[in-house]
Amino acid sequence: MEKVELEGRTKSFALQLITFSQFEFLKFEDQMSRPEAQNVSTLEPADLAPAPEPPTVQAEGADRNSKFEIRNSKLIGDEHWTTVIEPHGRLFDLKLGELWRYRDLIYLFVRRDFVAQYKQTILGPAWHFLQPLLTTAMFTVVFGRIARIPTDGVPPFLFYMTGTVLWAYFSAVLLGTAGTFTANAHIFGKVYFPRLAVPVSLVLSRLIAFAIQFFFLLGFLAYFMWRGSNVAPNACVLATPVLLLMMAALGLGLGVIVSALTTRYRDLAVLVGFGVQLLMYATPIIYPLSVLPEPYRTWAALNPIAPVVELFRYAYLGAGTVSTGLLAYSVAVIAAILFVGVVMFNRVERTFMDTV
């Protein structure tokens, strides 16, 4: 009984297969009977241009005896595209030019970071105004009214706000870039792009928040000047882009160093949180550099952020300790930290997937 039923199923499947084959043949015959199909069929083999061969690419630096060829048969438009991905050959082979070629990806990362930062929040971007306002108000009450720390003769509210706005940008860049490898391991393990594009995008996205807070500061500065307060902006305001670039470079350099080390030592992720808070008290944010006694003032001046904050205050308030030698020292230290950070970042990115 089972044999008869099986033979019946086999015959039914064979009939369906024959019917399907006849249908496909009739469909093909109908297509070939069209005029355009007949015109194509009349072409001679000599009239057809040969298909171009895919390009051959030799990796840079490869020995001629061990050269290899990469053929890409994917045709996009009228051109063949071939991409060669090579490991970093030398320690200082940073390949920073790739960041410019991936500038569209950096723009997408900037947009993602800014939009996702306040997604599903009630106040949204209004936090950019509330954070420096509440912090400045707290500093004014605690350090200005209770502790009575001098502010070089300028209104305490403006004194603390200038330091808070600049420090908020530096700390945001440092904390954001410190977790680059651990926070983006799921992306780095799937697709190739310059890993340095992620921390660079964080620097740019935090710049948007700084711009909002900076115009907020200018509004309060105009109000205090209208009231006749003792503030005197000067030509040093033209150095604002340079000062901002120095803070961004320092935050990026320290952040990528911490990010490279946290792939093996996760304790640094906890340390960097309150380390930034301790560093703020070692920086003239809540006090001017001029009120420190001479031994402490020398040690405080070794902080590369101190000359930047003092010049920023002097530019917009007319009060601060400005020294050309300290600024040159700060530039040298920041450049060295950024260089070391980028080198460490590029070295760790080769093998970080084995440890994260």
Image (cartoon, rainbow, N blue to C red):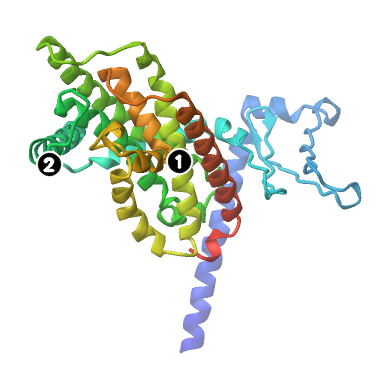
Residue nearest the observer in this picture, 81 or 93: 93
Residue hosting label 2? 147
Q: Where is residue 84 in the image (x, y as percent from the top left)?
A: 69, 43
Question: To which quarter of the image does residue 348 belong?
Answer: bottom right
Q: Is residue 20 visible?
A: yes
Give how far apart the Cα atoms at labels 1 and 2 are.
Answer: 34 Å
Total marks placed? 2
The three-letter amino acid code for the residue at tag 1 is Leu
Q: Residue 272 carries which label?
A: none
Q: Which residue is drawn at 27% across and 17% down?
A: 318
Q: Is mark 1 on a helix, strand or loop?
A: helix
Q: Residue at x 35, y 16 (%)?
A: 237
Residue nearest the observer in this picture, 13 or 136: 136
Q: What element carries label 2?
A: loop
Residue hosting label 1? 252
Q: Residue at x 55, y 40 (%)?
A: 336
Number of the front mark, 1 or 2: 2
The three-letter amino acid code for the residue at tag 2 is Ala
Outermost residue toward the right?
65
Residue nearest the observer in this picture, 2 or 230: 230
